[in-house]
Image: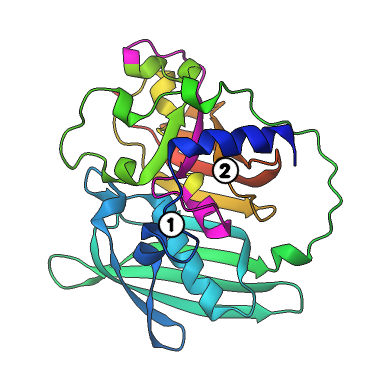
Amino acid sequence: MPEAAIAAAERASIDPVTASIGDSEFDRDTALTRRAPGVYDIDLSAGWTIISAVNGGYLLAVLGRALADALPHDDPFTISAHYLTASQPGPATVRTDVVRSGRTLSTGQAALFQYDENGAEVERIRVLASYGDLDALPDDVRTTATPPAMPPIEQCFGPEDGPAPVDGSSAIADRLMLKLDPSTLGWALGQPSGRGEMRAWFGLKDGRDPDPLSLLLAVDALPPTAFEIGLRGWVPTVELTVHVRCRPAPGPLRVSIVTRNLAGGFLEEDAEVWDSADRLVAQSRQLARARLG
């Protein structure tokens, strides 16, 4: 077992394991009820909101779970989402369509719908994804990528270390084990670095270990890199593509996100997710709208 994995396992004792994959708040809140072939109902939980909007990573995990049921393969390899309108807590319907079923890869699309105040159906998010079997992939790895250099988890800071939040402002924070690298926390002290970087240790608060579906949440769970550029306020996602590279080992994840370009009111966020065995388990790119002025 790599030394990094042993150290991470020891640090994970900060949040004791009380839930397992398939039996955790995340699993319950992403569970869907199949109404008909390819059609699912869900009550989007208010526990995964920022202000009043449902977090985009949580939504991606919901649609990812629906596609895992609809397709002949279980594991997301790549999933691309376009966020059309802001989702709200409450009833929603997911409709899926199998585009292609292959021996090693299957492709499908899914969309989530809710009703507006006038009773009209509104599409919130649409995804296209390819699924396969992560356990069937070869072990050969050739990479120049290296894990992010971060302080130990006990030297990083979470929401509980700052001022008490406004009630209801970030319910998702109560469900995450999020410890931010101090070097990316200048924005919280009124001194943003201008570098557009965010790094953190990540896990679920109830101790559930990561799996491919929770990786879809992890890439969109950190504070926006826009904060370290010097911007404040909501940074809504326009498009998010996630590549899941392998099944993560137990223990906390390390998430590193970088923005190199803000132009025309839009910025990109490139994320890497590393597991306790020092493996790159997921990558993503997101296009988001920045609130200027």
Q: Could you say whether the residue bearing mark 1 is in a helix, strand or loop?
A: loop
Q: In this rendering, does residue 23 appear at all?
A: yes
Q: In the image shown, does 243 or 4 lie closer to the viewer?
A: 4
The residue wearing badge 1 is 19
Q: Measuring 32% from the left and 70% from the top, which residue is drawn there?
A: 113
Pick whichever, 203 or 219, lies toward us: 203
The spot of residue 90 in percent (x, y) is: 22, 65
The mark that comes first in sequence, 2 or 1, is 1
* Magenta stretch contains residue 22: no
Span shown in magenta: 189-217
Q: In which quadrant of the rendered image does the C terminus lie?
A: top left
Q: Quadrant of residue 252?
A: top right
Closer to us: 282 or 19: 19
Q: Indicate the secondary structure of the residue bearing disc 2.
A: strand
Per the model, the C-alpha gap separating discs 2 and 1 is 30 Å
| Front position among marks 2 and 1 | 1
In the rendered image, residue 157, in percent from the top left (x then y), is placed at: 41, 24
- Tell me: residue 234, above or below residue 23: above
**Residue that appears at 69% across and 69% down:** 132
Q: Is residue 60 above or below residue 109?
A: above
| Amino acid bearing label 1 | Ala
Q: Is residue 211 magenta?
A: yes
Residue 268 visible in the picture: no
Task: Find residue 176 and report its horizontal and vertical position in percent.
Answer: 39, 43
Is residue 257 toward the left or the right of residue 290 in the image?
right
Q: Residue at x 48, y 68 (%)?
A: 65
- Write the residue at 37% across / 18% down: 187
Left or right, residue 85 beside residue 133: left
Few, some or many residues within 10 Å of mark 1 (<14, 14–19, 20+):
some
Give the residue type that dot 2 points to. Answer: Arg
Residue 285 is marked as 2
Query: Residue 29, image x and y in percent?
Result: 34, 63
